[in-house]
Image: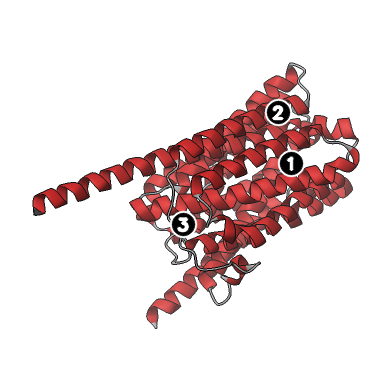
Amino acid sequence: MAPHGNGRTGDTAVHGLRSAGRSLLALTCAYAVYGAFWGAWAVVLVEYLDARDLSLAAIGGLFSVTSVTAIATMTFGGAMAVRLPRPHALAATFALAGAASLIVGTAAGGWLAPAFALLGVGIGMVDVLVNVAGAEIEATTDRPALQVIHAGYGAGGAAGAVLAAVATTAGWRPAAVLAAVAAGHLLAATALVAVVPHVPVTDDGPVPAGLALRVLGGRPDLQVAAVIVLCAFFVEGSMDAWSVLFVRTTLRGPVLGAATAFASFALAIAAGRIFAARVLFRLGRQRTLLVSGAGSLAAGATVVGAPTAVVAGIAFLVLGFFLSVAAPAAFGMVGGDADAGRAVAAVTTIGYGGFVVGPPLMGWLGDSFGLRTALLALVVAPACMLAATVAGGRRTRVASRR
């Protein structure tokens, strides 16, 4: 009887690993589509601003509408969303994000703020659910998943930027480019329903509004993770919103060249996360984050001082590689938490604070002093990320001695 039972256990384990592998592939592809939206958006932003006669400060304000809505969605809905049937919740949020990208591409005038707010709802739920699902795969298999999933985002961003540049050069309007991305979101939603398994969720009664943030109270480890994600998202969001604009307007680079510079950043993000997926569990998250912060700081300073589009592109590539591991490593810090769903939702919520503060600040700086000054954020944020990592390491060492 024992051999038969062990065989059954082995078969179940193999089936579980295969199911986790299929889920990881589906999540990675879906997150790549999500990244393609931001890559395409970075490229078409110049034409989008011209068509609607928007200033940098105005579009920065609309970005903040998206971010505020995303944070509110994660704060009040994130903890509840992780208790819904996983495949259907993921599919619904990707479908919503796709619909929102289509609406943003066509909205104008008084419809802009509601359109960007709807986009915030979609991306808020996507980020929470994808990170929770990735943390579950890591906890189940003891293998890296979040780095791979986030690598998909980078690869998708690169592809979206290059394809959008080609389409823009061929005369496509921003609405048409974003409509193509919306179609990709619907395909991703279909795949997620078909592949991702149901995850049993315990019903502990109603979830109070704002509980996601309450998890941070008295948890220095989660607070450090939240600061690191905030800084990493600040830099990634700055690149998504302003990098191509900086190359096209300040450095006078062509649209395809600017898109290639952004693609180098996005591909470096993907390559760095794949690399980290192979070494992270051996190197350790603390050391990985120290290397990430120091490298990102040096590359950000190079971007700010870049005299040409070529130098900026090289600096983007280096920045992407070093920055790539920061957010996934920080999320991995809470992946084994007993209340991982709410912990990830809380860290993601704080992380989106960078998207709230950054766009209006950088838009105002860009209008007043130029984008080169605004991009000093690429130096300040990595410095803060590095400081938080050092502080977190000291707290861990002190706690281990007690």
Q: Is residue 397 above or below residue 39?
A: below
What residue did someone put label 3 on?
A: 332
| Residue 100 horizontal side relative to residue 345, left or right | right
Residue 399 in the image: state x and y as whole percent: 43, 78
What residue did someone put label 1 on?
A: 242
What residue did someone put label 2 on?
A: 179
Category of crowding for the residue at label 1, using alpha-carbon neighbours closer than 10 angstroms: few (below 14), some (14–19), many (at least 20): many
Residue at the top extreme, as displayed = 170
Residue 33 in the image: state x and y as whole percent: 58, 34
Task: Examine the rendering and report whether any part of residue 245 can be seen.
Answer: yes
| Residue 48 horizontal side relative to residue 177, left or right | right
Dot 2 or dot 1, earlier in sequence? 2
Dot 2 or dot 3, earlier in sequence? 2
Circle 1 SS class: helix
Front tag of 2 and 1: 2
Residue nearest the observer in this picture, 265 or 327: 327
Distance between mark 1 and mark 3 Cα atoms? 28 Å
Front tag of 1 and 3: 3
- For badge 2, the amino acid type reads Ala
Dot 1 or dot 3, earlier in sequence? 1
Q: Is residue 391 above or below residue 23?
A: below
**Residue ID at (50%, 68%):** 204
**Residue ID at (64%, 24%):** 163
